[in-house]
Image (cartoon, helix red, strand yellow):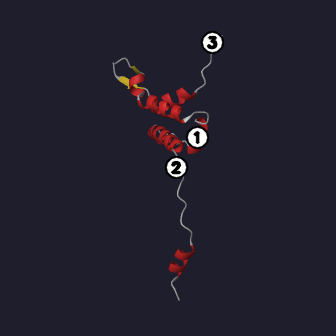
Amino acid sequence: MDPISKVIQQTSRPAKARRSSERSDLIQYFMDTVNRERVRDKRKPLPFLYFARKCTGLELKDLYYLKSICEDADRRGGWKDKDGKWHPTSFGKVFFGSLKAKTSEL
């Protein structure tokens, strides 16, 4: 008679490997970076599906452009306080600000 652990190992199926695509890797990158900022600010992290939904209408080349803009966030904008200390714009602000629909003036 075989031990029960050997029988369970034989009958259990191997775990499915998570499918990975270029698009999901980019969305995962956005999620990790924004959630790192959110946790630092003591806010709840956002789930993967939230970011996937936000990026639905974007093509892959647009996601790469968005990534380059967000990585350069500290150089592209920010503000100085009255003491002259520079406060760079956060990755999350640039990410969500870039995804907003632009309204045209009439």
Identify the residue position indicated by label 2 in the image: 20
Q: Residue at x 54, y 79 (%)?
A: 7
Residue at the extreme left: 84
Residue 44 drawn above or below residue 15? above
- Name the spot of residue 35 as percent of width and height, x first: 48, 40
Residue 43 drawn above or below residue 93? below
Residue 3 bears which disc, if any? none
Q: Dot 3 surroundings within 10 Å: few (below 14), some, or many (20 or more)?
A: few
Residue 52 bears which disc, if any? 1
- Secondary structure, mark 2, is loop
Q: Amino acid at mark 1?
A: Ala
- Name the spot of residue 55 as percent of width and height, x first: 58, 36
Which label sits in the foreground, 2 or 3? 2
Q: Amino acid at mark 3?
A: Glu
Identify the residue position indicated by label 3 in the image: 105
Q: Amino acid at mark 2?
A: Ser
**Image position of 36 (left or right of 23):** left
Which label sits in the foreground, 1 or 2? 2
Q: Residue at x 53, y 27 (%)?
A: 98
Q: Is residue 90 visible?
A: no
Going from N to C along the chain, the mark reached first, 2 or 3, is 2
| Observer-nearest of 35 and 29 | 29
